[in-house]
Image: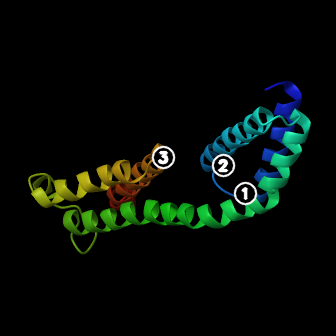
């Protein structure tokens, strides 16, 4: 592909990108895949004897950048929302369960050393840490989940101590 062809394809992709409101990773993956399809379509048209410019115009018309962008947004937006909700639910539920296992109803951590010998504590903690890694294909969601889980744990442990000052 020469520079002019690449510029035309870049313009088509820019038109599609304007219709998308997805995460950067999802947009990049989608646009890379669309770029491959556009380049293949141009090569096919050229191999059928069409002029490169005519092939690019034909491909641009067939793809309908705005329609493609809207359709991709409709398909992918609900999945991104579901990933975000799951990313929030897993650590919150795990933190609440661990809080119930570790702390007394009054919020004190008396006897927390005994908790470390309970299998339920370790099972919940490991599930809270491993499920995001296995569930989310994007490591940022797992990292976000771990960070949230860690922060809540530190808050629940430090807050009773700070209140005594």
- The spot of residue 107 in percent (x, y) is 28, 69
From where the camera sits, is residue 49 visible? yes
42 vs 91, nearest the viewer: 42
The number of callouts visible is 3
Q: Secondary structure at mark 3?
A: loop
Residue at image point 24% right, 75% down: 105
Residue, disc 2: 27
Decide which of tag 1 and tag 2 comes sooner along the chain.
Answer: 1
The N terminus sits in image quarter:
top right
Above or below, 45 relative to 18: above
Q: Residues within 10 Å of mark 1 (few under 14, many from 20)?
A: many
User: The residue tagged with tag 1: helix, strand or loop?
Assistant: loop
Image x and y of residue 142, in percent: 42, 49
| 10 vs 164, nearest the viewer | 10
Residue placed under numbered mark 1 in the picture: 20
SS assignment at label 2:
helix
Determine contact: label 2, label 3, CB under 8 Å: no
The residue shown at (81%, 57%) is: 64
Q: Are marks 1 and 2 in contact (CB under 8 Å)?
A: yes
Asked whether, in this view, residue 116 is left or right of residue 25, the answer is left
């Amino acid at each position: 592909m020469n520079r002019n062809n690449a510029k035309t394809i870049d313009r088509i992709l820019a038109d599609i990108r304007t219709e998308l409101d997805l995460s950067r990773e999802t947009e990049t993956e989608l646009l890379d895949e669309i770029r491959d399809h556009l380049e293949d379509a141009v090569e096919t048209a050229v191999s059928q004897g069409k002029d490169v410019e005519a092939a690019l115009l034909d491909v641009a018309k067939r793809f309908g950048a705005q329609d493609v962008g809207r359709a991709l947004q409709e398909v992918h937006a609900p999945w991104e929302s579901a990933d975000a909700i799951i990313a929030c639910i897993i650590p919150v539920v795990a933190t609440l369960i661990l809080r119930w296992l570790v702390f007394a109803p009054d919020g004190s951590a008396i006897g927390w050393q005994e908790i470390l010998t309970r299998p339920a504590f370790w099972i919940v903690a490991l599930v809270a840490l491993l499920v995001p890694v296995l569930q989310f294909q994007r490591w940022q969601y797992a990292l976000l989940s771990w960070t949230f889980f860690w922060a809540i744990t530190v808050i629940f442990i430090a807050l009773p101590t700070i209140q005594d000052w």
